[in-house]
Image (spheres, rainbow, N blue to C red):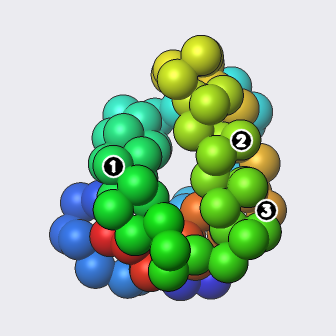
Amino acid sequence: MKTYSMKTGNVREARAAGPKPQGALTQKEFEWLTKLGPAVDRHWDELTGFEQKFAEDLLERFRRWGVKTIVSQKQWEIIAGISEKVL
């Protein structure tokens, strides 16, 4: 699966080490979601209705829970697709 890399700013193979246990976000994941919010706002009209609703729900949870936000592997795949459009 390809996703946006916060480290390099490029698309790359994500989570090569495999899925991590559910729990707190890593520092890179936290920074990724922090950058995603403003980018989604700037490119809102370029997103599909599904992507808009998903991003809105995810970012609201992120604003509420911060580093404690739980994100599944499937959700990271969707986030990666949105990131390719807006970051």
The residue that disc 1 covers is 38
10 Å neighbourhood of mark 1: few (<14), some, or many (≥20)? few
The picture places residue 8, in percent across and down from the top left corner, at: 20, 69
Task: From the viewer's perspective, tell me whether residue 35 is left or right of residue 59.
Answer: left
Residue in the image at 32% along x and 70% along y: 87
Q: Residue 74 has which mark?
A: 3
* Residue contact at pointers 2 and 1, CB within 8 angstroms: no
Q: Tag 3, which secondary structure?
A: helix
Lateral position of residue 2 relative to residue 29, left or right = right
Q: Residues within 10 Å of mark 2 (few under 14, many from 20)?
A: few
* Residue 61, quarter of picture: top right
- Write the residue at 40% across / 70% down: 43
Task: Decide which of tag 2 and tag 3 comes sooner along the chain.
Answer: 2
Which residue is labeled 2 in the image?
A: 57
For marks 3 and 1 on the same chain, the one whose residue lies earlier in the sequence: 1
Q: Helix or strand or loop: what does disc 1 sit on?
A: helix
- Three-letter amino acid code at the position of disc 1: Pro
User: Percent position (x, y) of residue 2?
Assistant: 53, 83
